[in-house]
Image (tube, rainbow, N blue to C red):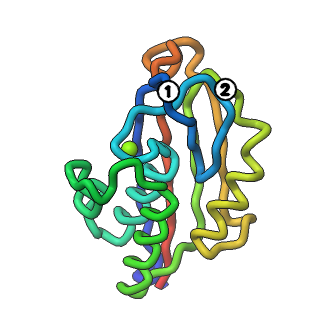
Amino acid sequence: MDKDFRVGIGYDSHRFTAGRPLVLGGIHIPYELGLHAHSDGDVLIHALCDALLGAAALKDIGTHFPDNDGAYANIDSTRLLTKVVDLLYQQGWNVHNVDCTLVLERPKMKPYIDEMTTTLSKLLHIDPSNLSIKAKTNEGMGFTGQGEGIAAMVVATIKQ
Ligand code: MG
């Protein structure tokens, strides 16, 4: 049993910028700022991809989808997640469960957690009961607390 399960951790952060839509967990969130990135800036999906790749010891998101590759300019990050899930599947891995934490002051995430959970669980081919998304503030401290950007942390388990 012990060799059939693996754990991975992922982290990402992006800074806020004007003139871009805010995309988190695969959904659009109404807000006056978006996230600066080569892709759509979905910091939650990027951390999730790294957690999954890490669990399978398949390097990281930057290795598979380089940000100097024009093919990934403004790409919908759900497409990256789909590619990561396919890559794991080719190596004999399925996603078991995922636990996510977003760190940001604004906008408030509570109205969007259910839709993000539904969206991501479909992409991961897992039951929504195996996917947790939490959001918290950083009490005004540091870059997340000062509203400069958003950070995401994800732990994922995969099974053979
Ligand atoms: Mg990123």
Ligand 1: which quarter?
top left
Q: Residue at x 38, y 56 (%)?
A: 50
Determine which residue is flagged by label 2.
Answer: 107
Q: Amino acid at mark 2?
A: Pro
Q: Is residue 110 left or right of residue 96?
A: right
Give coordinates of residue 43: x percent, y percent: 47, 43
Look at the numbered disc 1 and give the secondary structure of its residue: loop
Above or below, 143 against 9 in this view is above
Q: Amino acid at mark 1?
A: Gly
Give coordinates of residue 141: x percent, y percent: 50, 13
Q: Residue at x 49, y 85 (%)?
A: 1
Q: Which disc number belongs to residue 60? A: none
Category of crowding for the residue at label 2, using alpha-carbon neighbours closer than 10 angstroms: few (below 14), some (14–19), many (at least 20): some
Determine which residue is flagged by label 1.
Answer: 19
Classify residue 70 by image quadrant.
bottom left
Above or below, 122 against 154 in this view is below
Look at the numbered disc 2 and give the secondary structure of its residue: loop
Classify residue 137 by image quadrant.
top right
